[in-house]
Image (spheres, rainbow, N blue to C red):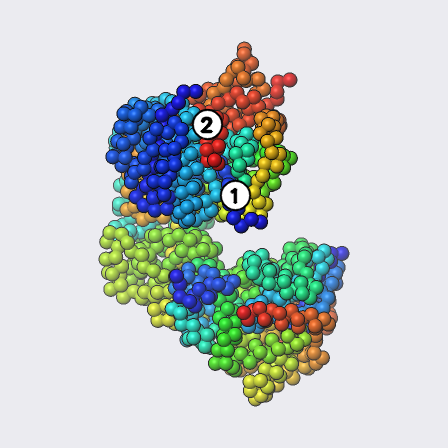
Amino acid sequence: MSDHKIGVYVCHCGSNINGVVNCAKVTEEIGKLGEVVVAKDYKYMCSDPGQEMIKNDIREKGLDRVVVAACSPRMHEPTFRRALEGAGLNGYLLEMANIREHVSWVTKDKEEATKKALSLVKGAVKRVKLHEPIEEREVPVTNTTLVLGGGISGIQAALQVAEAGHKVYLIEQKQYIGGNMAKFDKTFPTLDCAACILTPKMVDVGQSPNIELYTSSEVIKVDGYVGNFTVTVREKPRYINHDKCTGCGDCASACIMKNRIPHEFDEGLSKRSAAYIPFPQAVPLKAVIDDENCLLLTRKKCTLACVKACGAKAINFNQHETIHEFKVGSIILATGFDLFDAKRSPQYGYGKYPNVINGLQFERMTNASGPTSGHITLADGTEPKSVAVIHCVGSRDENYNKYCSRVCCMSSVKFAHLVKDHCDAEVYEFYIDMRTFGKGYEEFYNRVQEEGVHFIRGKGAEVAQKDGRLVVKAEDTLLGQYREIPVDMVILNTALEPRVDAEKVAQTLGISRSGDGFFMESHIKLDPVTTTTDGIYLAGCCQSPKDIPDSVAQGSAAAAQSLAIIATGKVKISPISASIDSEQCAGCQICIGLCTYRAIKLNEETLRAEINEAVCKGCGTCAAGCPSGAIKVSHFNDDQLLAQIEGVLA
Amino acid sequence: MNDKFEPKILGILCNWCSYAGADLAGTSRLRYPANIRIVKVMCSGRVEPTLILKAFQEGADGVLISGCHPGDCHYVDGNIKTLRRTPLVARLLTQIGIEPERFKQVWVSASEGERFGKIVEQMVEDIKKVGPYQKKMGDQLDVVMDEVAASAKEAAAAAEEKGGLNCGS
Amino acid sequence: MIAYQYYPGCSLHASARDYDESVKGVLGCLEIKLEEVPDWNCCGATITPSLNQLQAQILPARNLALAAENKGDLIVPCNACYMSLKKVQHNMVKYKEIREGVIDIFSQTGLSLTGMPKVRHLLEMIMEDIGLAKVKEMVTKTLKDIKIVSYSGCQLVRPLGFDDPEDPQALDQLMEALGAKVLPFSQKSHCCGSSLITTQPELAFKMVDSILEEARKVGAEMVVVTCPMCQLNLDAYQGQINNKFNRTGELPIIYFTQLMGLAMGMSKSQLGIQRGIVSSNKALEKIG
Amino acid sequence: MFEDFTSEIMSYPGGEKITACMQCGTCTGSCPTSHAMQYTPRKLISLIRANQKDTVLKSLDIWKCASCYSCTTRCPRGIKFTDIMYILKNLAWKEQTKKENKDITGFYSAFQGLIEKRGRMNETELIMKYSFQTNPAKLLEFAPLGMKMIIKGRAAFIAPKVRNQDQLQKIMKLAQERGGE
């Protein structure tokens, strides 16, 4: 075996590594190993001078293998691969030892950390000797994008990709787009009417020649990889012929179930028919028949008043669900949030006392096109004389969600303003901390304070009913006293939670979720838009609770990612794949059963298994199961792993 | 047991969930014992008995295998194949005299940095109780290793087969 | 015949004798055998934990040690005893120093904590093991919509209880199964004041009053309880409390087992119903 | 790192999470007796963290806890405040600051005395003992109720006790010696 020329580079990462690991000592020890011709430590290996140092050594000293001991390869492996390639060496002749995330940041004892770092580097040196050059595969990109979720983030992303001239498939689970924002009345801090700023965007989506909109639809399967996804979508029947429906609403007025079904769009504050138009500004402005309540669809018995009323003859009870398949280059996830169900905290009386409502119900109530035509009213139809707003219901609470939902302080302040504006009742805000961090937010808080709202620093602990009125029990912590404040209406400002089907969606798309249940980004600070799966991006509240400005910004950012892929026209995909040595293969076919991607087939002539490398994803499960050791996984073959194990345990 | 004994543990972690989980423990600056040495594979399904036996042969006192939670596997169900293989490997290790404390197979997601640290901590504690792994079979282990690995693979393959294809008989 | 071990607690041998009578009567009807833990001692209630944490573990733990390993779950009718016993088990698992402390002290007197039985409240056992279907089957004399509020109290549901700590459901469901009309009641798991009734009556009286006052307001004819301490505070002190707050209307405070017994056809005297300080006679007229 | 008293509380089972308090007042708002407290539960946590041990242990407020666990159940930061109240009472007992609130703590002495002696509680005897120890006039207050209980057959006159008193007394004594470390 010919001798290699290995260069080992130990990064201090400022004091991040060097503060715990004795980098100089690691370098010195490693330098003593055979075949290591250069061993250097440096303050920031990922900096330009750091990379230049590696490149120069490759050129001048003829290095043929490189080990970088630094941060996680998930962070800078591509950086150093590029450095190697810049000096004419194949990028896969690099091995990284993770001495930051796996050593210096998790170990207190300096000596132990140095020892551990040294063994990881030894493992890398042993492994890198057996590395082989691999060519990365480049594949062309499909220049279409799929956006999943039609709330404000999804709309923003879809419009931006479409405006750049590329095709977008916008998939929405509900019968209309607009998401939660469509239900809002005013938006903080400027008090723009939500519909006034959202409706034009919704109309643009409906009219854009580049956007194909699928409502009542969900993604059921995703195949492929960045640049070349195949997405399967199921579209539920609306029982309405879209081409014929004029959105006149005659079917809704005729329906026998009229005013009998709680209307989701009004958060249950109004009643609708089984055939209905979701709301007056809905896009698409088409009727829908709700198959859970339609008498014909549930009991097969109805006078079919809707069919008779429909002048356009648009109703079609023979519709079935449709399966669509789309080829797309990237996927933008913008599935939004669910509101915390306040019934999970029975102490607040939600669902028990009719005048205890949640924030979204209040939004509908104040909305001019809402169930009360914009009047704030109690269950008996009168105006409240005093209203309490309780912050942090289901947020910042170990019993439910540990995180801060971020938007509730501001929306609570907005609620207070709207109450003052609509009916001049007394308003009591029960808060733990006021978090008004955005542009113009503190100023808005200040303005509402001046409107005479009572801010009580103390979390509302309980809502009781006493002598026909509601009573909020809390400690006024600035006063240091227990207080019971009687009010007529209580608004519970509930947490923003991951959507109920977030787990399923994550599994379908093969992405991760963070501990709080929201979809996980690649890097919380520097890469908040991409997921760990290339070509799948995040926008809006599906990543974490956000206000409208942030949701819009992230929607644009995700669109930019999609457009970047389209602009380059091709993507590099992982070259890691398995191959079979037909000499050693016994034809037992065990590997065939192990491969989820059906990449392995039996060659009927030779009776040996063969792997289709284009389909293979490189997981290596087949190699682990092959009894004759005939399968080799590039970059993760037995020899390489065994050498690394030997090294790290030495 | 011996207070000074610091077990050496090899961790074989899948790239997508567990390695990222171990990274998260780092970025969150959580402290856990330095006894573990991590080797990355793309999927926990890649881990074959040879790698585990090699670790014991090279003086490891314990081996930890970690993949994505069932249902969350980046490769759909590679971890399910790991799960099917684990009892066999565990039995094999017991047969050659390696205590059950020394081999652990767990699931750690990319968001479970804290859990990863706790698992390592617990494993170190458990192994400290059983003491250092002396090559009980002495050099014999080295000799039989290849043989054992081959038979383990066969046994594992036989198990896969139950759910998979027939040998073509 | 299913067998359980039984820890009555001190009250059931004195101020809550009626509870004990009704428990035994009802379980007898249901063909359930109770075997009293031999030589049991007081659980320490909320008093011992206030004075000495280790003693607070020792008292319940001795009962667990005396209970047999394999004679069935340990059934406790009193909320406070239930919580004390359950909490010590919880602590023994969670805190090494407590576990070792108790084991060490016990080893000096020949006590051992090998097989600790599962601690369950009587209501929990009836709901889970017997079930509402069986209860309904046993009803021979329905409660005919007698209006009640169910009052679970604190320590049945908090902090280690088996039902929702804010809005418990079990007692409501059981009472409905007997044919009672269960009224909405927000004080279900509010506190009766427990021993504060002796040491700081001004505090406890207010607590009891707010429970009784809401019960009266919603139109209850009786308050159903699961705990001897709650019963004592709501029943025995009711006269004094009503005087103090100028309330009219007496509310009988009845154990859930007493109503079960009545519905199952047992007589009032068998169930100790005459022992209530506030008489139940009027409220029970409907069912004769 | 933390003030002495905070560290001391944290060292007892149930006191571990006291530093997580964000002073939201949910405990006070949920407490049925906080309306009568000078130092509400939230304030007690503040006082502990400000190392004001003497103020806390002498306070009558720690004896107002009814052990209803509402604060513990609702605390958004997982603080077991009922357990902390028990810890504070234990310390007050040990450090004799209980004397400040003799009228109340006398009940605890009486109860504990009976248990240590006989292993079981007798309410009649407890009330008598408490009254004699604190203020015999109390007996008059309890008398009418006592009579009713006797009539209804709800008072036990023969003091109940465990059979193996030696064992019980021994373990209680051992526990006290260690608990008082």
Q: Is residue C102 visible?
A: yes
Against A435, is D175 above or below?
below
Pointer 2 chain: A
**Residue B20 versus residue B144: which sits nearer the camera?**
B144
Under mark 2, the amino acid is: Gln
Give the farthest residue toward the top. A605
Marks 2, 1 in one chain: no
Q: Disc 2 to disc 1, how far (Cα)?
A: 24 Å
Q: In screen coordinates, is A13 left or right of B52?
A: left
Name the disc covering residue C104, or none.
Answer: none
- Name the residue at 53% across, 27% down: A624
Name the disc covering residue A640, or none.
Answer: 2
Residue A394 point in image, percent of width and height: 42, 55
- Name the residue at 60% across, 79% down: D110
Residue at disc 2, secondary structure: helix
Q: In screen coordinates, is A502 left or right of D177?
A: left
- Name the residue at 34% across, 52% down: A406
> Label 2 neighbourhood size at 10 Å, few (<14), some (14-19), many (20+)?
many
> Label 1 neighbourhood size at 10 Å, few (<14), some (14-19), many (20+)?
many
Which of pointers 2 and 1 indicates the residue nearer the eye? 1
- Name the residue at 53% across, 46% down: B5
**Residue A624 versus residue C230: which sits nearer the camera?**
A624
Pointer 1 chain: B
Residue B77 point in image, percent of width and height: 51, 32
Name the disc covering residue B7, or none.
Answer: 1
**Residue B166 versus residue D167: which sits nearer the camera?**
D167
Against C245, is C153 above or below?
above
Residue at disc 1, secondary structure: loop
Residue A587 point in image, percent of width and height: 57, 17
Under mark 1, the amino acid is: Pro
